[in-house]
Amino acid sequence: MENNAPPKINLKKPQGIIKNMETTVIPFRGLRYNATKVQRIENVIAPPYDVIKPDEQAALEARHPANIIRLILSQPQANDTDDENQYTRAAARMNQWTSEGTLVRDATPRYYIYDQSFDAPDGKNYTRRALIALVKLEPFENRVILPHEKTHAGPKADRLNLIRECHANLSPIFLLYADSAGDIEQIMDSFTEKNQPQIDCPETFGSTHQLWCLDDSERNREIQSIFSTKPLLIADGHHRYETALAFRDEMAQKTSNSASSGYDYMMVNLVRMESPGLAVLAIHRLLSHLSADRIADAIAKLPEPFEVHEIDTQANLMAKLDSLKGKSAGVGMYTADDTYRLLIPHSTPPKQLDVTLVQETLIKNLFQIETLAEHISYTAYTDDAVAHVKEGAGCVALLMNPTPVEQVLDVAMAGSTMPQKSTYFYPKMATGFVLNLLNE
């Protein structure tokens, strides 16, 4: 297996951290598909809800009548009411699958070890290991769970309506933790080396999937203790985390019980930041619906903030961008006249991120774009970015290096946030292996 060398993560306490605040990561009784009812798990799992296109949804629904898509992305109907809608239908299905034994809750609390093996677009093979657990919810100001991106109201309203009806975490969010010694992964390794996975799923959605049930109480107490001093960084799932906080507060107002409850926790995938299995991709910016004059004006102004180098091919441009990693900021640009440009800023503020450079200097200042939704889309694939420009008038591709995970951590530790779509931790984790009931 070929892997990148692990990054060196210098984890300091977050600014403004509250004394005596502990991170609580605990095992739980997961709700899982019954192997006697569902012989092929690949037929009932799905990608995360927010990356599924309509044609993909139809294909997933056709795979199996109990595919998780029917819970995470139930569709509205013309005659929906407040009492009968896509959210109530999702809850009714989940209850039906539970009552008929399609979904079964594990008898005792445990952690779940989840491995994904995949080939990344960089041509390398990775195996990413996650620990699926419950994390106690903490407001961001407590500096225990750290965000790095801003959220938007629409997705939060949708997920809040779903959790209100289902009272369950239907999919885990993705958190990162720093562990330079690898203590937690060593505990997991000691278990998986001696035990067969309960799920061994063939390649589905770009990766293979294996799942172990870590029901060893001694190991689990050790894992919980190690996590107690570690702040956690949200890699993917900001909207669902904020939704879980809002729902916890709603439920606290409805009950006088001050004791800790299931609503105080949410299900998460925890991945070590230093892991060689952590693949982080760039997210390129695709500009659309621009007039020829606006594009020409922006290109004419490029020499003011940038050294501009014309490059002969896409491959050579991406190679030169890659050579700048860890040394200098840099951005690639492809325009409809079939010109590749490498843009290196004359000067950048200390620790400025490439995504901030692109957002502020190129998108806002040079291209004069304020309404991002109208003009900006995203892709992790360079070929798709170039094809986007070739296929439509008024388009420009801005090509980037990945944001290093240590820079993401620095931003979160400082209490700041990054522009939208700054990171892409590849690939997405599949949904459907484990669910978490909040009301038991």
Image (spheres, rainbow, N blue to C red):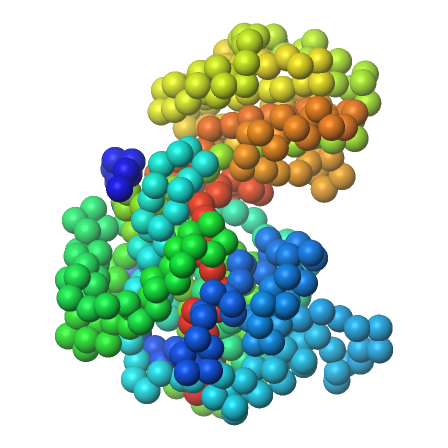
Taking the spot 47% from the left edge, 56% from the top edge, the residue there is 204
Residue 137 image offset from top left, x and y in percent = 42, 68
Residue 107 image offset from top left, x and y in percent = 32, 87
Taking the spot 39% from the left edge, 18% from the top edge, the residue there is 323
Q: Farthest residue in the right direction?
A: 79
Q: Is residue 325 above or below residue 126?
A: above
Q: Name the quarter where the C terminus is drawn.
A: bottom left
Residue 293 image offset from top left, x and y in percent = 81, 16
- Which image quarter: residue 230? bottom left
Taking the spot 52% from the left edge, 91% from the top edge, the residue there is 99
Left/right of residue 245 with respect to residue 34 in the rendered view: right
Q: Is residue 386 above or below residue 371?
A: above
Residue 177 image offset from top left, x and y in percent = 31, 53
Quick check: can you spot residue 119? yes
Quick check: can you spot residue 156? no
- Which image quarter: residue 93? bottom right
Q: How many marks?
A: 0
Q: Is residue 175 above or below residue 27?
A: above
Taking the spot 30% from the left edge, 64% from the top edge, the residue there is 113
Closer to us: 393 or 240: 393
